[in-house]
Amino acid sequence: MSDGRVSVVSKVAVVTGAGSGIGRAVALELLDAGWSVVLAGRREEALAETARLAGGGPPALVVPTDVASPERVDALFAAVRERFGRLDLLFNNAGSFGPRGVALADLRYEDWRAVVDTNLTGAFLCAQAAFRLMREQDPHGGRIINNGSISAHAPRPDSVAYTATKHAITGLTKSLSLDGRRYRIACGQIDIGNAATEMTERMPTGVPQANGEVMVEPVMDVADVARTVRHMASLPLEANVQFATVMATAMPYIGRG
């Protein structure tokens, strides 16, 4: 008799923030490559739309999840274990920029906490749950890819909460890489600059620069990010892209400020 699990022919991935933007693009890229993908995010309708966009092929499991909630994260990975029996990849992508155009001195504590809870605590909770599953499964091992940011290296004006959490993601990546060695758990980070998504929709009309000016910035196709994540995920566990930066070629990053 069947135990209710899907027979694992393809590899299994969890993508957080899969209802839009980079998360949706990566989920669709992995599905197109033959992965079974668990779509996690707060908006069930948006996740269902991602699943519809995928069409046929391997299964896409929709699991509404608030990554800042330990209970919801536990439920997400319990669903992964029950449905697939193992996990090969976590793309730790869910994140929030917080309120835009708010000076550091005016940022409310509640807004700071909301960004930290999603971007950092949520990433930790998902990484910890994935780590436990990857450590215990047979054969053990897997890969975690954290979504960092160009802001992990150089901040934008009025971005203290977002920038602080993205610097912290780099520390999370390094610690996961070190602690995962004995269990064949690889961890890398992708730092993304100006991918064309809802978050960067202001770029073509101009965004504040470090010198106080407002400048139009170029963007790149989000599909280029998705292909980069797919490459990182496709490597054998004996190889790892520790840090990758993919960005619009002409964006003001090298030398900005």
Image (tube, helix red, strand yellow):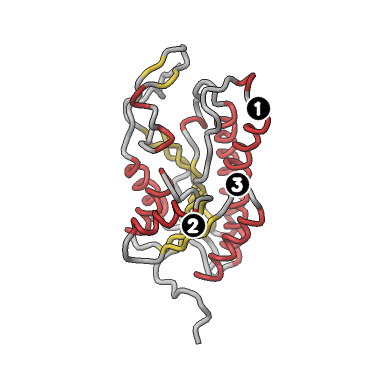
- Please name the residue that numbered disc 2 is placed on: 14
Identify which amino acid the numbered label 1 is placed on: Arg
The residue nearer to you, when weighing 104 against 47, is 47
Q: Earlier in the sequence, mark 2 or mark 3?
A: 2
Residue 118's disc number: none
Asked whether 232 or 222 is in front, the reply is 222
* Cβ atoms at labels 1 and 2 below 8 Å apart: no
Left or right, 130 with reference to 257 = right
Q: Which mark is residue 122?
A: 3
- In the structure shown, which secondary structural element does the residue marked by tag 1 occupy? loop
Question: Upstream in the sequence, badge 3 or badge 1?
Answer: 1
Alpha-carbon span between mark 3 and mark 1: 20 Å
Q: Which mark is residue 108?
A: 1
* Residue at 62% from the left image edge and 51% from the top image edge: 125
| Residues packed near mark 2 inside 10 Å, few (<14), some (14 to 19) or many (20 plus) | many
Mark closer to the chain start, 1 or 2: 2
Q: Secondary structure at mark 2?
A: strand
How crowded pointer 1 is (Cα within 10 Å; few <14, some 14-19, many 20+) is rated as few
Front in this rendered view, residue 235 or 250 = 250
Q: x, y percentage for residue 30?
A: 37, 56
